[in-house]
Every structure is written in C-alpha cells, then in structure tokens.
Image: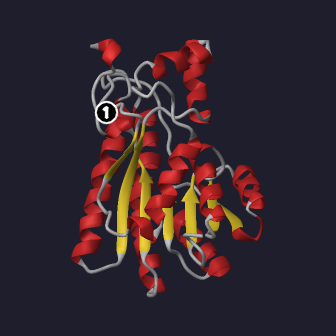
Amino acid sequence: MKLTERVALVTGGASGIGRASCIALAAEGARVMVADLNGDGAAATARGLGDHGASVVMDVGCEADWERAMARIQERFGRLDILVNCAGIGVSGNAEDIEMAEWERVVAVNLTGTMLACKHGIRAMRAAKSTTGSIIAISSIAGVFAAPDLTAYCATKGGVTMLSKAVALNCAALGYDIRCNAIHPTYVDTEMLDPVAEQVGDRETMLGAMRENVPMGRLATAEDIAKSVVFLASDDSAMITGSTFLVDGGTTAGMPGRHS
C-alpha cells in the first residue's frame, strides 16, 4: 500500500469528492481525519473507514475551527502528512447581479478555506519533522477558463489555482519537503450538481448537456478524482509540485469535434 503510516485530513469529507478521497486514501493505508460542517455526514464517512477513520466538525472559513481540527488530529493520530481541501460551494450569478452575501460566502469557503488549509497544514507537517508532506486543493476547470454566470465560483477557483502555485514555490524555496498541487476536475457527477438540476428541472437533460462539452463523452466520477488525490498524496508524485493537475476528459484541450 502506498500510504501506510501516513495521516491525512480531508475537508468536505461527508460527501462527493471528499468522501471518495477519504475512502481511497484509507484503502492505501492512510489514517484519515474526516472534516466537514456536516458532522453526521463526516462521522458516517469515518465509521466506514473503521480504525483508520475519525471525524471533526469544522467550517473551513473559520480559523478557530482549523486550530481545533489540528489539535484533534494531533490528539488522535499524532501527526499530519496529507491535507486534501475538498470543501467547496458554488452559486450562479454574474458580476452585475450577485449578492454580496453570496459572494462573501463563496470566497470564505473556496478561497479563504484553502488559504487556511495551507497555513495550518504547513505548520502541522513541519512539526512532524520526519514527514514528507502533500497539500492537495480541489480547484476546477473553472479555475482555468471562465463562465459568464459563475462569477464567484470562477474567481475563487482561479484564486485556488494560483494560491497553490505560490504555496508550492514558497515551500520549495524554504527547503520544506512539502508539495502543493491543485486538481482541476471537469464536471463531476456528485451531490453538488443537485441544486443546478433543480433549476433545470431535469437532471438527465442537464447531464447530457454537460457530457457534450467533455471530449471523452462522460462526466467524471468522484472516484476518478480520488484516484488523482491518492497519486498526488503518494511518493509516486514526488517530483510534482505547483501543478495545474487536469482531470477533465479533454475539456480544456479544445472544443469537441462536433462543436467545431
């Protein structure tokens, strides 16, 4: 197993990519602290991991919650080697119409949450001394190219992309053995699409339209992304840091042939 004796903290671990990442990391031998604002969901994920799992309730945009989470992981597992920031939200709205409360909420979760993950993750990994650390942020193809009605989401995911690069360069410059990478998934068929499906009124019609924009002809699954999380968490990716790691079925390579 690739991650035996390593300890991971995964935010957004109650559902979707976060839950799949917890399962995949534990399957490779890691012990996993499942973090989520949904305490019941986090606890359920942790129970499924048996002795390899524990959970903590946290709001990723709250620094006090990060301090409590780090104390909890130290108490339960004694160290931190891997941090996966999956917590994220999205709301529709253009720059002219978006409400400030919605803008600030998306920024707090997606961008501030990732910054706090890096801040406290680096400190915990350095304290472990013997560890090689890996910080993994879940960005999006929306961090590479924009959509007109996803102003806050695109802005924050673009911020996550550049934040991860800055953190990677800083850790390398200071001689820390800590890598930082951002994964950029295409559309992923998870619970995060449910509000969009409600607006559209027909989930299958919505998914069909999304598939047309993916050259490989399908949406990603949470498990697809979790496999990339394991790769970036492991020594298999020891020379990879600061990357824009695309898991997008060719979405950002160019328009599918039928659209040309």
Split into 4 quadrants, where in the image is the N terminus? bottom right
Residue at 53% x, 52% y is 227
Does any portion of residue 85 appear in the rendered image? no
Residue at 51% x, 59% y is 230
Instruction: Note whether 39 is above or below 129 in the view shown.
Output: above
Q: Which residue is mark 1?
A: 252
Could you say which is closer to the camera, residue 20 or residue 73? Answer: 20
The residue sitting at the left extreme is 173
Does any portion of residue 108 appear in the rendered image? yes
Mark 1 crowd level (few <14, some 14–19, many ≥20, 10 Å Cα): some
The residue sitting at the bottom extreme is 129
Could you say which is closer to the camera, residue 231 or residue 201? Answer: 231
Q: Is residue 217 left or right of residue 71?
A: left
**Residue 58 percent coordinates (x, y):** 60, 58
Instruction: Note whether 56 is above or below 149 in the view shown.
Output: below
Residue at 36% x, 68% y is 179
Could you say which is closer to the camera, residue 176 or residue 199? Answer: 176
**Residue 114 percent coordinates (x, y):** 42, 55
The kind of secondary structure element at disc 1 is: loop
Instruction: Note whether 125 is above or below 116 in the view shown.
Output: below
Residue 134, picture quadrant: bottom left
**In the rendered structure, which amino acid carries the disc numbered 1?**
Thr
**Residue 176 percent coordinates (x, y):** 32, 79
